[in-house]
Amino acid sequence: MTAQHRFRIAVIPGDGIGQEVVPEGLRVLDAVAPGRFEYEHFPWGCQFYLQTGRMMAEDGLERLQTFDSIYFGAVGWPGVPDHVSLWGLRLAICQGFDQYACIRPVRLLAGVPSPLRNATPERMDWVVVRENTEGEYAGIGGRNLAGRGAGKQVAVQAGLFTEEGCERIMRYAFDLALTRRHKVTSVTKSNAQQYGMTLWDDVFAAVARDYPAVETEHWLVDAMAARFVLKPETLDVVVASNLFADILSDLGSALAGSLGIAASANLNPEGRYPSMFEPVHGSAPDIAGQGIANPIGAIWSAALMLHHLGLSAEGQRVMHAIEVATAAGQVPPDLGGRCTTHQVADSVIAALADQ
Ligand SMILES: NC(=O)c1ccc[n+]([C@@H]2O[C@H](COP(=O)([O-])OP(=O)(O)OC[C@H]3O[C@@H](n4cnc5c(N)ncnc54)[C@H](O)[C@@H]3O)[C@@H](O)[C@H]2O)c1
């Protein structure tokens, strides 16, 4: 890679506030690394579905395959069933591109109020590592027997846990812990789910033996929900299945101030496919179109993309600029401020210019 290398980014704003926060993330990317990115925009999402019957083009994955990364907004809109929109676009990309490691940092940013008493940036700094391709979101199951009459329908939704799938996400979590505070907590519900989740436990124990420098713990998900609230300072890397980590990371982001600031990376760590970067939040139809969506989740996700592309210094600059803006109270209504989406990004860009 030369200094002139331009990264090709596929941009999928999607629905609702995805359309509002993604352009702000792009402005920040261009401010921190001018000329380094070439964007191609894809109009996929619920409007595209209503026009074409598909959430993305038929050759969508083929087209995305050639990009360095994907920058995503959110998907989902009233009028299209949520399982259709999610499976037709976001999950299709995560699974199709084997983006098995979903990384969701939880950190209290400077100046952001937490609903927790005694919350400080030091006490609140952990990463949720979510298995992103199988588990409860494997899409295996079915519905039947509606023909037997009202009230007789049945549904089966299976969870898929493979030894290989468990092992690779755990190795990712342990490697990440080596760059942090050397602690990994595995979260399951293996007392009640005695097949898939005991396999998860066994693989966790086996992988842990390869990482003697990392402290390990095993917690049940219900107890972990309480621990997120009561003892967040004891967390470093939390690895969990697709569903559990999805729920826990929303809890974590709420404790860190708002769902609107939560960022995520969907990684194919081996680089066989492009990785995807997106805010954790959804399309928020309740506030879409008002210009008040918090863009920090999208901007933080852009910072994660910068790290992934090898532009770590630029990623750190963006994180610093976000905290300059939050510390100065330049925040939107979900964080108690009065700024618009655009003004928050303006503040981040101004802080970048001051560095
Ligand atoms: N990754 C995704 O694309 C994704 C994730 C979750 C939900 N969804 C979809 O989004 C739609 C709405 O779902 P939902 O309401 O459960 O979740 P949501 O995340 O869209 O909204 C939950 C609440 O948080 C608020 N919120 C979310 N992001 C915000 C932001 N950036 N700034 C300020 N406030 C914000 C919303 O106003 C809402 O009150 C559904 O169609 C759902 O399927 C998509």
Image: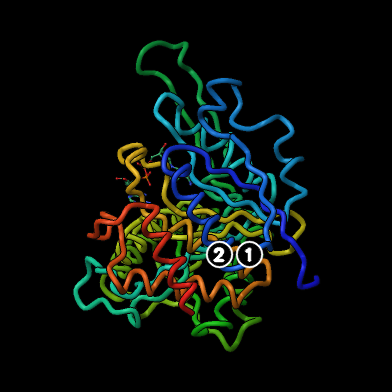
Marks 1 & 2, CB-CB < 8 Å contact: yes
Residue positioned most to the left: 117
The residue located at (26%, 54%) in the rendering is 333
Residue labelled with disc 2: 31
According to the image, what is the colour scheme of the structure?
rainbow
Q: Where does the image place residue 75, in percent across and percent down from the top left?
A: 49, 39
Q: Where does the image place residue 107, in percent across and percent down from the top left?
A: 39, 71
Ligand 1 location (quadrant): top left
Relative to 233, residue 78 above or below: above
Q: Residues within 10 Å of mark 2 (few under 14, many from 20)?
A: some
Residue 197 seen: no
Kind of element beneath mark 1:
loop
Kind of element beneath mark 2:
helix
Q: Residues within 10 Å of mark 1 (few under 14, many from 20)?
A: few
Q: 105 or 133: nearer the eye?
A: 105
Disc 2 residue type (three-letter): Ala
- Quarter holding the N terminus is bottom right
The residue located at (30%, 38%) in the rendering is 286
Q: Where does the image place residue 51, in percent across and percent down from the top left?
A: 57, 20
Relative to 27, residue 72 above or below: above
Residue labelled with disc 1: 34
Q: 260 or 253: nearer the eye?
A: 260
26 left or right of 191 in image: right
The answer for how far apart the CA atoms under marks 1 and 2 are is 6 Å
The disc placed on residue 326 is: none
Q: Where does the image place residue 2, in percent across and percent down from the top left?
A: 80, 72
Relative to 62, residue 347 above or below: below
Disc 1 residue type (three-letter): Pro
Q: Give the tally of numbered discs.
A: 2
